[in-house]
Image (cartoon, rainbow, N blue to C red):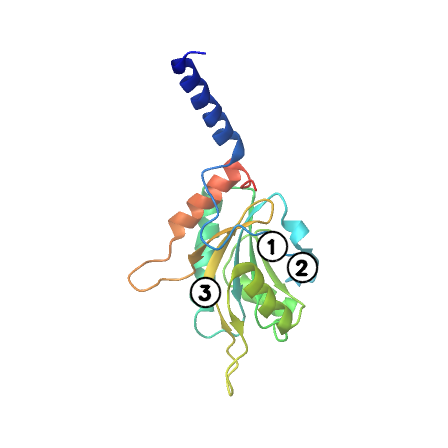
Amino acid sequence: MKKGMMVTLLAIITLMISACSNNSIEPSGQFGNKMQSFDVTDQNGKKFSQKDMKGKVYIADFIFTNCETVCPPMTYNMSTVIDQLEKDGVKNYGVISFSVDPQNDTPQKLKDYIKQYDVPNNKWTLLTNYDFKFIKQYAEDNFKSIVAPPPKGSTQVTHGTSFYLIDQNGKIIKSYSGQDAGDKKFPKSEIVADVKTLVEEGPVED
């Protein structure tokens, strides 16, 4: 085979492999792991597990209803992402928020909390009905994020403020700041664009 034909053939094969093997978003940094299994309760008192996430792109975070500092801006920011995705007609996505104060965050408290943000009922799932030890370890093992009990004399749980992008197979792809960070604004446009890309292109292959 002539050299020119060989080069052309190799180029075509490379393009085919590239087109079939992955999409334009790849796991960043420490991510690329699939979420471990869980079996918890949502704000409607219904069972929810990682199996219920399959086939949809998700954004995840960690909050609690009694939070006096970072959670209100985080939750507002998440609601603006949902608003934009709805406005843009994106369908196959969802949001999950793990409570880091499950002892106090009953399903009803979570339901009342999320009502303040006027988002579609079927898009945002808030999770509870597990113990603190579980969520502390789950956040660390899956999302590389800290969850620590309140300091003495406080009711405020310490937790991370990132949002996480999860593909249709439950793989954690990347993280974003869930609030303004210094001179950097909350990256709403980046999150919306990445969700759209995963919805359109499908899950990131192993």
Disc 2, SS: loop
Q: Is residue 107 above or below residue 190?
A: below
Name the residue rendered at 57%, 62% in the picture.
141
* Image quarter of residue 4: top left
In three-dimensional space, the C-alpha distance between marks 3 and 1, rounded to whole angstroms, equals 18 Å
* Mark in the foreground, 3 or 1: 1
Residue 34 point in image, percent of width and height:
59, 51
Q: Is residue 183 above or below residue 14?
A: below
The residue labelled by disc 2 is 38
Q: Which is more N-terminal, label 1 or label 3?
A: 1
Which residue appears at 48% of the width and 55% of the height?
30
Left or right? Give the position of 130 relative to 113: right
Residue 50 location (% of width, % of height): 65, 53
Residue 161: numbered disc: 3
Report the amino acid beneath label 3: Thr
The type of residue carrying mark 2 is Phe
The residue that label 1 is drawn on is 35
Measuring 45% from the left and 11% from the top, which residue is drawn there?
Answer: 1
Q: Earlier in the sequence, mark 2 or mark 3?
A: 2
Q: Return the x and y of residue 147 as percentages of the image width and height.
A: 53, 71
Q: Is residue 89 visible?
A: no
Front one among 80 and 2: 2
Tell me if mark 1 has few (under 14), some (14-19) or many (20+) residues whose alpha carbon lies within 10 angstroms of its own: some
The residue lying toward the viewer, choosing from 118 and 155, is 155
Q: Residues within 10 Å of mark 3 (few under 14, many from 20)?
A: many
Q: CA distance from mark 2 to mark 1?
A: 9 Å
Q: Position of residue 20 (x, y in %)?
A: 53, 30
Q: Which amino acid, mark 1?
A: Met
